[in-house]
Image (cartoon, rainbow, N blue to C red):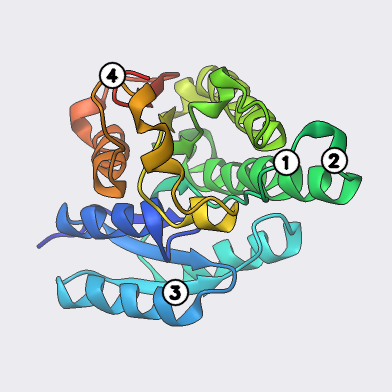
Amino acid sequence: MTSKGTVLVTGGSRGIGAACVRLLARDGFDVAVNYARSAAEAEKLAGEVKAMGGHSIAVRADVGSETEVTDMFAHIDEAMPPLAGLVNNAGVLFEKARLEDFDAERINETLRVNVTGSFLCAREAVRRLSTERGGEGGVIVNLSSAAARIGSPNEFIDYAASKGAIDAMTLGLSKEVAGQGIRVNAVRPGLIHTDIHASSGQPDRVERLQGQVPMGRGGTAEEVAESVVWLLSPAASYVNGVLLDVTGGR
């Protein structure tokens, strides 16, 4: 299979990120799997991509660190075919709490990883994809959340606010780089069956809240990934600046 180029998936070792990696490999992309702590999972996933006939590496970086992000992209430049896309998926979610119980450390860490991390990775991707800088164009897909419009009251409004920032960045950047051959969109998942809920201290969250979903169930990581991969594909060639809800109607 001829490669369609390299896509970097941040936070790609598990959940929605891992589902994106598998579907991208299925569709003929080479994939760089970024991780912060889950080295074994990322290496295993890279092995799966190779078994499907693609190129893949697992690359560690804290996306909230400018130095680590620039080093990660430099490593991808050396080890992989030219960059064709970025899936800005890495993020953190702290335990359920109300705002009056937040401290500055929690707020700053949420924004550092979820917002600064996405900006830094998008910056490096634009520098490589932009036709004004010698690139051949490409696609950036940001992982936002339905929390950006719901607000996640009594749970994690800091996370919701960080995803609101991603929505604004998506809209602005899509206009900024459209003339440089780059499309920028966001996918906003709703209640999805991943282990992120356990990390917030609510492993049963999807089951508890799925009655609020018109379709009556939580979604799967693969259902979200299908939307991400579609946005990366030529089938979405005239789709730019879109915030796509994958929420079952919630």
Image location of residue 188, percent across then percent down: 44, 29
Image location of residue 155, percent across then percent down: 65, 36
Depth check, front residue: 230 or 200: 200
Question: Marks 3 and 2, Cα distance to the nearest angstrom?
Answer: 37 Å
The numbered mark at residue 101 is: 2
Badge 4 or badge 1: first in the primary sequence: 1
Position of residue 55 in the picture relative to residue 182 (left or right): left
Image location of residue 160, percent across then percent down: 63, 30
Against 191, is 76 above or below? below
Rendered image quadrant of residue 244: top left
Badge 4 or badge 2: first in the primary sequence: 2
Report the residue marked by disc 3: 58
Image location of residue 123, percent across then percent down: 62, 42
Residue type at mark 1: give it: Ala
Report the residue marked by disc 1: 97
Which residue lies at the image location 67% right of the left edge and 50% below the top edge? 95
- Sort mark 1 into few (<14), some (14-19) or many (20+) by Cα contacts within 10 Å: some
SS under mark 4: loop
- Sort mark 4 into few (<14), some (14-19) or many (20+) by Cα contacts within 10 Å: few
Task: Say which of marks 4 and 3 sits in front.
Answer: 4
Depth check, front residue: 147 or 101: 101
Do the CB atoms of the residues marked 1 and 2 lie less than 8 Å apart? yes
Badge 3 or badge 2: first in the primary sequence: 3
Question: Marks 3 and 1, Cα distance to the nearest angstrom?
Answer: 33 Å
Do the CB atoms of the residues marked 4 and 2 lie less than 8 Å apart? no
Residue type at mark 2: give it: Asp
Report the residue marked by disc 4: 214
| Residue 140 visible in the picture | no
